[in-house]
Image (spheres, rainbow, N blue to C red):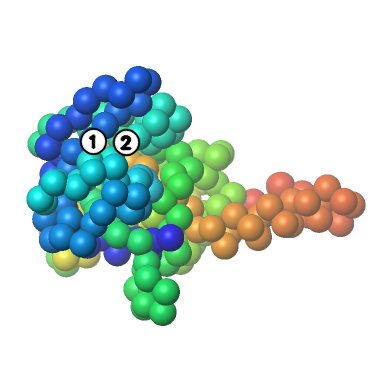
Amino acid sequence: MFSGIIEYLGTVGSVSKLGRGRSLSIEAGPLAEQAKPGDSLAVNGVCLTATAVHGEMIEAEAVAETLAKTTLGNLTRGDRVNLERPLTAGGRIHGHLVQGHVDTVTRVLTLEELPESVLMAFALDDQLGPYVVGRGSVAVDGVSLTVARLDEDRFTCSIIGYTLAHTTLGLVRPGSRVNVETDIIGKYVVSTLARIGAGGSGVSEAKLREWGY
């Protein structure tokens, strides 16, 4: 479990084929000091398992299913990636609960520069729609963000300068593809209400959308 607060902006050192998957070697700076094989690491919001640690380099594997449902299959040597270690029991949660299980990949639609931030709009499809709510939380490439504005075909987040400077969100442009994970609590709420509706309560998928779920 993660919080969506990026600890280090790493760099892909190498990418090699591993059957239908990929083996990634990532420069993780200080995060590698206490890392060991078997540890979890969120890479652009995707939970991976460290397979080896060499100095400041952490190696991890991404299976075919992960490559198909995230942007990790497009990574090449020199790409920057958001890195976060798992939460520790009793620690503070500064973002929101993030599993590292990406729901889908979406596109950056527009960037609107403001004096102290950037309004970044992302495409919203039917798969994401029920789980994105105004003022709710969403993880984009592993970064915990708040939905500032919600429209029929997009959701918009306000990205402050610190986040732009310390994560890959400062590198994206319109058309860039990003990983999205919606709030796990919202998923359970929607799933539960849908099951109640199926049992005859009248809470249909259309009604959930009307309520903003």
Query: What residue is at 55 percent from the left and 40 percent from the top?
Result: 127
Closer to us: 213 or 39: 39
Residue 120 vs 177, above or below: the answer is: below
Query: What residue is at 55 percent from the left and 46 percent from the top?
Result: 129
Q: Is residue 101 visible?
A: yes
Residue 63 vs 110, above or below: the answer is: above
Check disc 1 and report its element: helix, strand or loop. Answer: strand
Lower position in the chain sequence, tag 2 or tag 1 = 1
**197 sits to left or right of 173:** right
Residue 194 vs 21, above or below: the answer is: below
| Amino acid carrying mark 1 in the image | Leu
| Amino acid carrying mark 2 in the image | Glu
Residue 210: image quadrant is bottom right
Q: x, y (%) of residue 81?
A: 21, 46
Could you tell me which quadrant the C terminus lies in?
A: bottom right
What mark, if any, has residue 24 been given in the picture?
Answer: 1
Residue 136 vs 76, above or below: the answer is: below
Closer to us: 167 or 60: 60
Q: Residues within 10 Å of mark 1 (few under 14, many from 20)?
A: many
Q: Is label 2 in contact with label 1 (beta carbons under 8 Å)?
A: yes
Label 2, label 1: how far apart the Cα atoms are: 6 Å
Q: x, y (%) of residue 116?
A: 16, 67
Q: How many marks?
A: 2
What residue is pinned by disc 2? 61
Closer to us: 123 or 68: 68
Q: x, y (%) of residue 5?
A: 29, 64
Check disc 2 and report its element: helix, strand or loop. Answer: strand
Query: What residue is at 50 percent from the left and 58 percent from the top?
Result: 183
